[in-house]
Amino acid sequence: MDHVDVLKWLDDQPLSSVVFLCFGSRGAFEKDQVEEIAQVLERSRVPFVWSLRRSSPGSVLQSSIDYTNFEDILPKEFLDRTENVGRVINWAPQVEILGHPATCGFVSHCGWNSTLESLWHGVPMATWPMYAEQQFNAFELVVELGLAMTITIDYQNEYKELDKPRILSTEEIEKGIRKLMDENNIEIRKKVKTKSEECKKSVMEGGSSFISLGKFIDDVLMNSPREEK
């Protein structure tokens, strides 16, 4: 399924019904963790779009790459059993999915671009940080700002006694997704909607980002070396 097909599939879904799972350009899981996520998605019957990628064979620092066959990593016949519920894709058109009216929640690694895109479109997040500054971003979103729910947040302490990341259980994942998709979770949804409106106002003429960018451009032009005639 390519990105055009998944957007067409979203067109057929009810308003604010779909959970989107995507973990960034280097976000990849081992088979054990993939199976836990798959069990949750199949059992919950929540409509989903899942961007599933595999680690680069060269280095964990390189971008993840496409699967040629999802059956190599997913539980047997998972795709058949969930055909009417969700879609598994490689690369995801993230901005378009987050901006689609069918999308209700975003399970994310909390990379900064993903965080900004989620807030811009007013889509609440469930945090699953994996590396770099993502734990800090998740903490800010959940604890400081109250703009996200948590699936996991403190990966550095969770993993420090292990040789590899801890496998999150189906219970942990399902609890986070159900909370994320709960239509009665009004407070966080209201905060995220307000933040989305603030983001959009900031880039309009007279907004804080509009003014700051203008000042930056003026400063660059004023301090650029001028060629002597």
Image (tube, rainbow, N blue to C red):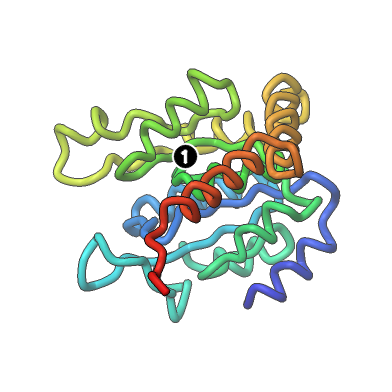
Q: Quadrant of residue 67?
A: bottom left
105 relative to 24 in the view: left or right: right
Residue 43 visible to an observer of this rendering: no
Residue for point 39% across, 40% down: 129
Residue 64: x, y in percent? 36, 66
Residue for point 38% across, 39% down: 134
Residue 206: x, y in percent? 74, 37
Q: Quadrant of residue 97?
A: bottom right
Above/below status of 212 relative to 3 = above
Q: Which quarter shows the N terminus?
A: bottom right
Above/below status of 227 relative to 13 = below
Which residue is situated farthest in the front direction here? 229
Q: Quadrant of residue 25?
A: bottom left
Residue 96 visible to an observer of this rendering: yes
Q: Which residue was labeled with disc 1?
A: 170
Residue type pointed to by label 1:
Thr
Above/below status of 114 relative to 81 = above
SS for callout 1? helix
Q: Residues within 10 Å of mark 1 (few under 14, many from 20)?
A: some
Residue 33: x, y in percent? 38, 50
Residue for point 56% across, 28% down: 149
